[in-house]
Amino acid sequence: MMIRVDDEVSDELLSAFPHLVSSVSHVQTTLTGTVVDQEELQGVINYLASMGVTIVDVLTIPE
């Protein structure tokens, strides 16, 4: 799973997702990792949106 947002996400906000790895490029942050199910993915998306972060992409990456 990969989520790309159109912003540089703070360490404080990233601490909500300790199981995801972040990388920053061109003032975008990419979170990659495994989510257990659709409910967990929706929780990550909802949290980012509630913090005012614009989500650019959500992609499933084959294992």
Image: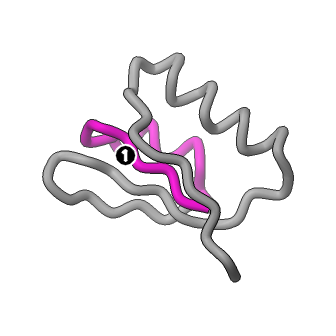
Residue beneath disc 1: 11
In the displayed orientation, state which residue is furthest to the bottom. Answer: 63
Please identify the quadrant where the N terminus is shown. bottom right
**Residue under the point 47% across and 56% down:** 31
Residue drawn where x is 26% and y is 58% of the image: 24
Q: Nearer the viewer, residue 56 or 39?
A: 56
Q: Examine the structure image and report whether residue 3 is included in the region drawn in magenta.
A: yes
**Residue 18 at x, y = what percent?**
59, 56
In depth, the one of 43 and 58 nearer the eye is: 58
For the residue marked with disc 1, what is the amino acid? Asp
Is label 1 in a helix, a strand or a loop? helix
Position of 36 relative to 49 (above/below): below
State the count of labels.
1
Q: Is residue 63 magenta?
A: no
Q: Which residues are magenta?
A: 1-18
10 w.r.t. 24: above or below: above
Residue 27 picture location, percent across and down: 17, 46
Quarter occupied by the C terminus: bottom right
Q: Is residue 58 left or right of residue 36?
A: left
| Colour basis | one colour
Q: Quadrant of residue 51?
A: top left
Residue found at x 53% / y 17%: 50
Q: Residues within 10 Å of mark 1 (few under 14, many from 20)?
A: few
Q: Position of residue 39 (x, y in %)?
A: 84, 39
Residue 26: x and y, percent? Answer: 14, 53
Q: Residue at x 59, y 27 (%)?
A: 47
- Furthest residue toward left: 26
Left or right, 44 with respect to 8, comes to right
